[in-house]
């Protein structure tokens, strides 16, 4: 069950030639471009993904899934003549271009339920379906996104067709037989795949239980195999889904192909690493909402004022409200922010902000208390922001914020009306973080690290080293305690 994106259309030629034979697990993908702390060389056949990561159903919201699909999909392929090459399959063409997955809609009722939309039917986007299935089966939506790519190349394909959608996740498509038509349909495929993963995670049947299992390198048994010690149920679920492991040669060529190679589980790991980071994490990573470090040499404590904010992104629209310290926007997707709003909870007032807008410069007046700054839907990028508190609040609190800027990344924190972003450089802000801290408090910072092969270490304080050096062991989680004390 693995349709690689580099052969997303070649497979239909194969299907014609082999009387609709199965999608072959041992085809390969093109190399996507990305970089993360973990690398492809960290692949281990017995631990491809952890139970924790496969079960993180809240890893992405609907809007975040949509933003990711929009960033990866090329939805402007105007070479519509290519549809004539495969007259037996349907291509969705609108306004002179192929409709890609990020723009596609799927029926929610009728005979086409879960499949491509017909005129007049109620519908869902791919992002909505991915999120819904993830919640129903408590499966990480990132797992489903990677599955759609490694099986049918649907995330990146600029001219997908109906047959790819019918077998979107390769469920019911063994390597040695045709696909079973009763499992056809985009939503049906996602649901069946997620149901299988959840069954194994909950202790249900798997043909690759925990412990040592002999796993082949290729559907051709003459290519051999080796014993793999399967360390967790999530990895077992992947082998129940795609029952082959990559040989050493397959692991040495990136997303390439070799003799007797199988690439399904390799590509799953590689894609997850390239797009989302380490799939083998076993504890919750630290986020900005969990703890906020001090800015420069200024000691601060977490906010006691409930703050929230949201941003509007081109091609996505308004995101959900984020709490103080969380990221609003996107990083790594090159989606410009064209508007934002900030407010305090419980109808409190006293937060002021404005934007530096493409071609317009600084807004002449500050907005406040949930009003929109910028020009949502205009495609005019926000290049810089200023945020400050009212005189009353600023006597007791500081407001800190930073921006993720095109070609720069996250800038340093600034505060109290200083400029975050850039002016005069034509660079878009893509994400923001904001929090409020009391002026009259200082903190003692305690931290400890969860280290590969060691687990949780003892607590250390105020600048002492957490983790290891010189042992090549990665930190998998960091826990921080901010202990409030009165100012001297």
Image: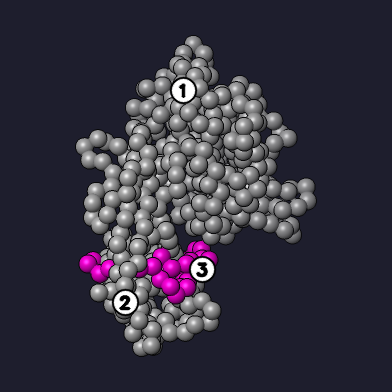
Q: Which residues are magenta?
A: 296-325
Label 3: element kind: loop
Q: Quadrant of the N terminus?
A: top right
Q: Nearer the viewer, mark 1 or mark 3?
A: 1
- As drawn, 172 above or below 276: above
Task: Report whether residue 10 is seen.
Answer: no
Label 2 sits on a secondary structure element that is: loop
Q: Residue at x 30, y 59 (%)?
A: 445
Query: Which image quadrant for residue 332?
Result: bottom left
Name the residue: 48% across, 37% down: 50
Dot in front, 2 or 1: 2
Q: Nearer the viewer, residue 216 or 6?
A: 216
The residue wearing badge 1 is 229
Relative side of 22 to 381, left or right = right
- Judging by the rendered image, the residue that carries numbered circle 3 is 321
Q: How much space separates mark 1 and mark 3, taking CA atoms?
A: 44 Å
Q: Give the crowd class for mark 1: few <14, some 14-19, many >=20 residues within 10 Å.
A: some
Checking the image for residue 440, the label placed there is 2
* Residue at the extreme top of the image, as rendered: 222
Mark 1 / mark 3, whichever is N-terminal = 1
């Amino acid at each position: 069950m693995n349709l690689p994106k580099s052969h997303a259309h070649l497979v239909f030629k194969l299907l014609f030639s082999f009387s609709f034979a199965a999608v072959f697990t041992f085809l390969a993908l093109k190399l996507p471009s990305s970089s993360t702390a973990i690398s492809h060389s960290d692949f281990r056949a017995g631990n491809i993904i952890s139970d924790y990561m496969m079960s993180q159903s809240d890893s992405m919201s609907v809007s975040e899934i949509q933003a990711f699909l929009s960033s990866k999909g090329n939805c402007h392929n105007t070479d519509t003549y290519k549809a004539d090459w495969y007259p037996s399959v349907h291509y969705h063409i609108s306004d002179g271009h192929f409709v890609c997955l990020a723009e596609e809609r799927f029926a929610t009722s009728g005979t086409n339920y879960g499949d491509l939309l017909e005129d007049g039917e109620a519908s869902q986007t791919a992002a909505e379906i991915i999120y819904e299935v993830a919640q129903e089966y408590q499966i990480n939506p990132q797992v489903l996104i990677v599955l759609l790519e490694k099986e049918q190349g649907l995330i990146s394909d600029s001219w997908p067709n109906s047959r790819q959608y019918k077998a979107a996740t390769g469920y019911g498509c063994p390597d040695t037989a045709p696909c079973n038509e009763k499992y056809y349909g985009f939503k049906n495929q996602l649901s069946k795949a997620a149901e299988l993963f959840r069954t194994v995670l909950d202790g249900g049947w798997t043909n690759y239980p925990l412990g040592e299992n002999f796993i082949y390198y290729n559907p051709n048994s003459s290519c051999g195999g080796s014993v793999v010690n399967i360390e967790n149920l999530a990895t077992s679920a992947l082998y129940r889904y795609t029952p082959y492991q990559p040989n050493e040669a397959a692991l040495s060529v990136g997303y390439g192909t070799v003799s007797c190679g199988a690439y399904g589980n390799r590509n799953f790991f590689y894609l997850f690493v390239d797009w989302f980071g380490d799939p083998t994490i076993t504890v919750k990573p630290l986020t900005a909402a969990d703890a906020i470090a001090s800015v420069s040499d200024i000691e601060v404590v977490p906010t006691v004022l409930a703050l929230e904010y949201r941003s509007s992104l081109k091609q996505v629209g308004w995101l959900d409200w984020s709490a103080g310290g969380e990221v609003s926007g996107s990083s790594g997707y090159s989606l410009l922010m064209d508007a934002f709003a900030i407010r305090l909870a419980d109808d409190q007032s006293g937060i002021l902000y404005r934007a530096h807008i493409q071609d317009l410069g600084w807004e002449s007046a500050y907005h406040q208390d949930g009003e929109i700054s910028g020009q949502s839907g205009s495609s005019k990028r926000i290049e810089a922001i200023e945020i400050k508190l009212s005189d009353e609040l600023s006597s007791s609190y500081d407001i800190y914020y930073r921006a993720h800027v095109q070609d720069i990344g996250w800038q340093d924190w600034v505060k109290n009306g200083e400029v975050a972003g850039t002016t005069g450089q034509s660079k878009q802000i893509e994400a923001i973080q904001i929090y409020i801290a009391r002026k009259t408090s200082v903190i003692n910072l305690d931290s400890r690290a969860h280290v590969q092969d060691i687990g949780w270490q003892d607590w250390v304080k105020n600048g002492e080293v957490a983790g290891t050096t010189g042992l090549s062991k990665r930190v998998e989680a960091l826990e921080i305690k901010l202990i409030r004390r009165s100012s001297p």
